[in-house]
Amino acid sequence: MLFCLGSASAQDAINTATVAAPAGITDPNPGNDSATDTDALLTPALAVTKSGALDADVVVPAGVANIGDQIAYTITVQNTGTGPASGVTVSDPLLAALSCQIGGSAVALPATLAASQSLVCAGSYTLDQDDIDAGSVDNTATVTADQACRPGLDPVCSATENTAVPQVEALTLAKAAAVLANDVNGDGFVNAGDTLEYTVTATNTGNVALSDVVVSDALLTPGSITCATLAAGDTCVLTGTHVVPAAEAQAGEVVNTASATSTEVPGPTDSNTVTTPVVQVPALTLVKSNATLTTDADSSGDITEGDTLSYTVTLTNTGDVALSDVVINDAQLSPASASCASVAVGGTCVLTGTHVVTAAEAQAGEVVNTANATSTEIPGPTDSNTVTTPVVQIPALTLDKSAATLATDADASGNITEGDTLSYTVTLTNTGDVALTNVIVNDAQLTPASATCANVAVGGTCVLTGTHVVTAAEAQAGEVVNTANGTSTEVPGPTDSNTVTTPVVQVPALTLVKSNATLSTDADASGNITEGDTLSYTVTLTNTGDVALTSVVINDAQLNPASASCASVAVGGTCVLSGTHVVTAAEAQAGEVVNTANATSTEISGPTDSNTVTTPVVQIPALTLDKSAATLATDADASGNITGGDTLSYTITLTNTGDVALTSVVVSDPQLTPGSTSCATVAVGGTCVLTGTHVVSNAEALAGEVVNTASATSTEVPGPTDSNTVTTPVVQVPALTLVKSNATLATDADASGDITEGDTLSYTVTLTNIGDVTLSDVVINDAQLTPASATCASVAVGGTCVLTGTHVVTAAEAQAGEVVNTANATSTEIPGPTNSNTVTTPVVQVPALTLDKSAATLTTDADASGDITEGDTLSYTVTLTNTGDVALTNVIVNDAQLTPASATCASVAVGATCVLSGTHVVTAAEAQAGEVVNTANASSNEVPGPTSSNTVTTPVVQLPALTLSKSAATLTTDADSSGDITEGDTLSYTVTLTNTGDVALTNVVINDAQLTPGSTTCASVAIGGTCVLSGTHVVTAAEAQAGEVVNTANATSTEVPGPTDSNTVTTPVSQVPEFGLLKSAATLASDADASGDITEGDTLSYTVTLTNSGDVALTNVIINDAQLTPGSITCANVAIGGTCVLSGTHVVTAAEAQAGEVVNTASATSTEVPGPTDSNTVTTPVIQVPALTLSKSGATLATDADGSGNITEGDTLSYT
């Protein structure tokens, strides 16, 4: 901002008036002879500011500074002084016109500005290329006024503004479609050898000049052009030609891209790619070689029927494109074809094959052969040359005699036998390659014996049909053997037929008859057939066939002898086996002898069974009953003798001594326990046993013996049958028992309540007569008691004799801790003495013990973890200490969890110890609980306890673990019913977590973000238990594009925070390429007649958009629209959802204007969707414009009424 002041801006208006005294008068107060007045002057001051803004959207392209774009300037003049400024003018050499305002109202210059007012002037400047090249515009505005900013008087009042002009350096390169410059073969298509012409245009699309612009295209001649300078908007054009080589013809297209560089845009900048289709001209030749004789079947040295010829058929690619799926065919060769997947230009495909000369060819005298070939490019077929090979003709015949058929069955046997009539057919076939004449077929065994044919064509036949009666010799030989022969003029022969051998059936047969049994020996003279008797049989074989039988064997395993052999048995003859059989117990038990013989021979391998002969056997039931001597089972008095009260054991055995099973068998003995036994059945020779016991009674002891007899019955032997009587002697035994009662405290000397030294104990000694005889003069003695004995004159069996006495505890007994006392007794019968039981009475001492269990130590670290875990071995020491005042005996330290589980010490002195050292293997349950809790216990005779030790708790480190397995996907919903897994299909998965650790898992979560549901939670999973997530997944576009669904689940738990991944499941996805093609409505790009309507000659703009709507990227995408310029565009790759856009223009033709519309459809192809696929059809109305012009010619003088030669009144004028 510049401030400009007026010329008096620093001064005031000062005025002084002065008074002077008249002469001669003295001024008494000269100090007030004058007065000064100072007034401030009102002066203007001007401040000037200028701003500029570039508008880059005035001309296209918008947003870039171009020639014709404008800078809008604003010049502000503010009066910052105290007085008005008049005559204010603003000048700016770049601005042609200014519009000015004061306070929003327009004013003309010069203008007057009151103090504090502002004058705002606006103007615009249009850019030229020099401004753009300079990169900015410098501009200064100047202000003048009457009172300020006066030229030559005041400082210059101006404001300068520098406005940046952005420079843009840009280059585009467009390559036009190829033009066919030289059509070598004049077919109107681009082929190999044709010359194409291209135009490549580089356009400076920036706003500054480019230097050293080079347009290059290595495919063209010339290959580049250089433009030293290329002004903004100008073009640099390379025009060149290209001769289509064989490789491009083979590829089917010429693909070409140019590039451009400049000093400012080094690039290079590529042009669009122009793909020009090349019409390929496929061609081939097929040549078949002459035949060569490979196999001379008849070694004749000539080519004859049956010989093998070799041919080679060679296809050559004489075109300019590789041939694919080439097949050479020759139906006469083996192999009949050869295939080549591809034959390069100039390459070959060869079929080498053989041909066996046929009868027809031999008959024709030549082999004529032509091959052909096809390919994808030349479906043809294309024939080769024809090769004709001469064949030497050879006459030949074959003679075939059919098998005989039974014409007359003389014996109606259904088989061919002597006297039967057989029918034969003998067929002569001309197997040569020339007709046969005077053909004769002969067979001397037939009726008729020959047949004659005058002529038999190639492949024709001559047939002799005749019969033959089977002779006795042929029947004996077992066959009819027959051979025919044939002759002809060409094959004089004779030629024999095959030999036909016809079997003559012989029928061997036999019968086998077994006679009823006869009683040879009656072992028990009962007159009946019973067990042990001998039976006699005869088995007779008769030859009932029509042929002798050889190696005949008759077998009967039940007879003696068991077989008979005959070397040969003539027709009607016999072979006999005579033998005997002893009736067995089993047969007697069964009640019959059942017998069948069989026979074999060389001719009848059989075996052939005889009739079955059944012979009744009379059955005889019987039994025996045996009672064993008694054995001493329980010796009640251990005397070794059988005495009263002893238990005896008996065994009673029933034996079936008959020849029939016994049923409902009962063995009884009321003196035994149990008193009987039953057997439902007892087989012959079998037994039924009763085992029981018997206690000897007092009566039996008194009697001196036990007498006993058993009995038995059965359904067949109702009896009863008694056993033998067993008498067992009983020994009489006097006996007594002497029992001393435990001591009772009679007098408690120290009132301690315990038995101690000086206390009086009371005992009772009781003698009981437990023998089986009265005892006399019985005496009971006990030296420690008072009284010391008792006497009973007699004690009956079961009676008693009693001694009651007392004993004072001695010091020695107190020290020993016990009073030990035993009584004894005698009698006349048992002089003895007999001791009583020993009664030991404790004298109270105070036994005590402590039990201490050490902390566990890790002995074996099974998993080498350094921690105590499941399977580790812990070591413990359990120590018992005798803390009482008496030695402990029979001390046992127990710990059921240890190995060993206990330790025993016979005696532990006061203060001494008894130690159990053992180990323990940590169990799964303890690992799950997280600790091993263990307590030992101990006992002794003195402290029976048990006394427990301290409890030792040992922490166990738990090892939580899990596995996670994910199943393969199954197709749950086939969205497109394709049968394949594709985008949008629903897959089902199962993810299974298994607790493989040693502790229950809690808060288990299985996650799979790709599934629905995406997770599952199990509050707890026991050891070995599972937690399962079942879910589905819809195949996404990205997965379809990738061609697979890759999925991994994971799991966590409080114990295994993880996460732990599952196996990865990869499921292939079938990809579905597809696209949509949309053509936009036309827009009016150029309105040729400025009518605002679409009319003939106007240029329409279209956009054709291909969108990849499939699930796989599209390659080599081509959009075609023959009505547009350009007519196509190629996109090398279009991603899923991506687009390829063809933008082009079309000039409305006269025909379209006449039709009233432009109808247009685009199409597109890609490698994946070869199509083509059409877009929507866009119909654009065309306004039809009727128009006319009217022109009037100047008048001509049609009639010159007055002949003046001028147009005058009355003349007639003519107009057109």
Image (cartoon, rainbow, N blue to C red):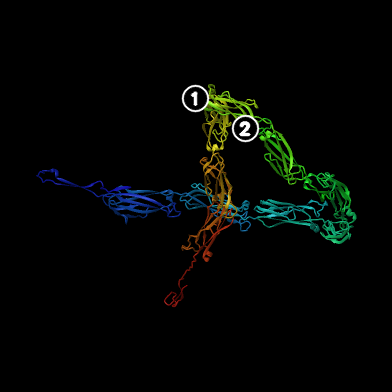
Q: Is residue 731 above or below residue 134?
A: above
Q: Is residue 187 above or below residue 228?
A: below
Q: Nearer the viewer, mark 2 or mark 1?
A: 2
The crowding category of the residue bearing disc 1, from other C-alpha atoms within 10 Å (few below 14, some 14 to 19, many at least 20), is some
- Residue hosting label 1: 749
Which amino acid lies under the numbered mark 1 shown in the image of this protein?
Answer: Ala
Q: Is residue 1200 above or below residue 1112?
A: below
Local secondary structure at mark 1: loop
Local secondary structure at mark 2: loop
The image position of residue 223, as x and y in percent, is: 56, 50
Residue 768 seen in the figure: yes
Q: Are marks 2 and 1 in contact (CB under 8 Å)?
A: no
Tell me the distance, in whole angstroms, between the alpha carbons under discs 2 and 1: 39 Å
Q: Nearer the viewer, residue 711 or 1038?
A: 711
Outermost residue, left direction? Answer: 24
Which amino acid lies under the numbered mark 2 shown in the image of this protein?
Answer: Gly
User: Which of the marked residues, 2 or 1, is nearer the chain's N terminus?
Assistant: 1
- Residue hosting label 2: 798
Residue 606 seen in the figure: no
Q: Nearer the viewer, residue 730 or 377?
A: 730
The crowding category of the residue bearing disc 2, from other C-alpha atoms within 10 Å (few below 14, some 14 to 19, many at least 20), is some
Q: Is residue 565 left or right of residue 761?
A: right
